Image (cartoon, rainbow, N blue to C red):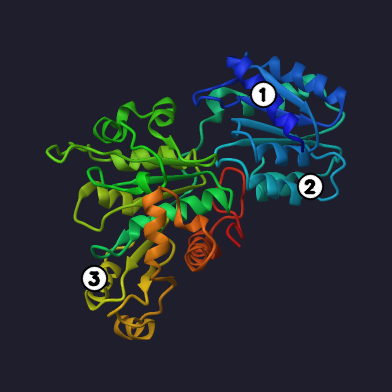
Amino acid sequence: MSDDLAIQVAAQVTAGPSAVSGRSGRIQILAFVTDADSEAVLRLGLLAVGPEEVIIHRGSSRTAVGAMKKLPSPRVLLVDISGDEQPMSTLTALSEVVEPDVRVLVIGERQDADLYRQLTRNLGVAEYLYKPLNAEVVAQHFGPQVAPASIAPASALGGRILALSGVCGGAGATTLAANLAWYLANEVRRHTAVLDANLHTGSVAMLLGAKPGGGLRLALETPKRVDDLFMERIAEPAGDRLAVIAAEEKLTEQPAIAPGAAKHLLQKLRHRYNYVVVDVPLEPSAWHGELIEMARQRVLVMQPTLQAVRDVLRAIALPTGSQQTRRSLIVLNHLGAPGTMTRHQVEQALQHKIDVVIPHLPRVVNAAATMGTPAAATRGGFRAAIRDLAAEVATSGATDAPTRRFGWPFRRGAAR
């Protein structure tokens, strides 16, 4: 796909405010069709069921994949698989570049019940129609799928929440959280948000060259105010597919966090991002407990010290959250630091295998932190370790995860 098409779509979004709903710059209905007849019928059928402007471009399902790599995900995406010899592979690729709450509609040439079942049951496509299209049929079957009330994502669906916690001071969980989020967004190409739960002295935003927003405290104190527009305002962009949600509250003030506010915030984030990386301190705080409870995967970050071994054992003994399908991952950071234990010694003391090892590379990590750029952006041992961590958190729990791709957070082989 050429850059010209992306520019054209972006221009239409700017020119047509009626196509945008909630989030700034988000298209309401975007379609890619291969022929003029289908385009005309679709436009007539869709406009008959709603006032929203429909943006239709001539192109195949592969064109749609190329476009979604460069553009914000729409609320509803319609693709034409006509002429595609491997439509399932193409739609799988499409699922990897759109946000979790996108509703996907498909048209094609085949009147095939097996294809319909594969698309709707296995991939999570909302509806499939075969050509030649009829405006009345389009309105009847696609109409309910594009209605604003039906587009709101179900509470059970959404992105994968990853909670990283340092078991003791200096373990480096914040550095790993920032770099993991950057890697998922830039290398795995998933829409990713990173939430810094340290409201006073957090440094995730600084590590990613972003600014702490002013809305996180408000979201936690008054969760009823948190809607799509509010989320747009508090998520500070740190790249095309990466957003940072952080605060920098006065040291003399303690926010009055409402019960359930953290869960409500995470639910909103899950509907918008494929991955939500949370840097959460391991401390007896009610709202920090909510963040850990909501996590699909907990990650415990430790140093190769005897104190860290003790604290990991205590952390492992904590109750498993309802969303977690496997034990906490153990990350051994700063391996090789002078005067510390070896990996073998740590594993012997824990009576447990380490899942991911991060080498001690202070020159690389400190230089990146000083410049406000992710250390994982530089090739070498640290980047390779972050890649291993991304593979672990993206594939953990794969055996019991559903295989649906659209409207579901887990995509097999996401970080491989």
Q: Which mark is residue 311?
A: 3
How many C-alpha atoms fall within 10 Å of the one at disc 2: few (<14), some, or many (≥20)? some
Q: Which mark is residue 87?
A: 2
Q: Is residue 27 above or below residue 355?
A: above
Question: In this figure, which residue is indicated by the disc labeled 1?
Answer: 143
Q: Earlier in the sequence, mark 1 or mark 3?
A: 1
Q: Is residue 108 above or below residue 148?
A: below
Q: Is residue 322 visible?
A: no
Placement of the N terminus among the 4 image quadrants: top right
- Residue at 66% x, 21% y: name it: 11
Q: Is residue 243 above or below residue 11?
A: below
Task: Name the secondary structure under disc 1.
Answer: helix
Q: Which residue is nearer to you in this view: 62 or 367? A: 367
Residue 394: percent from left, percent from top: 52, 59
Q: Which residue is nearer to you in this view: 361 or 331? A: 361
Write down the quadrant of residue 27 in the picture: top right
Amino acid, disc 1: Gly
User: Along the horizontal axis of the image, is 224 left or right of 58?
Assistant: left
- Residue at 36% x, 70% y: name it: 334
Residue 48: percent from left, percent from top: 70, 14
Write down the quadrant of residue 403 in the picture: bottom right
Observer-side mark, 2 or 1, equals: 2
Observer-side mark, 1 or 3, equals: 3
Q: Is residue 15 above or below residue 182?
A: above
Whether the residues at callouts 1 and 3 have beta carbons within 8 Å, the answer is no
How many C-alpha atoms fall within 10 Å of the one at disc 1: few (<14), some, or many (≥20)? some
Residue 186: percent from left, percent from top: 55, 49
Amino acid, disc 3: Asp
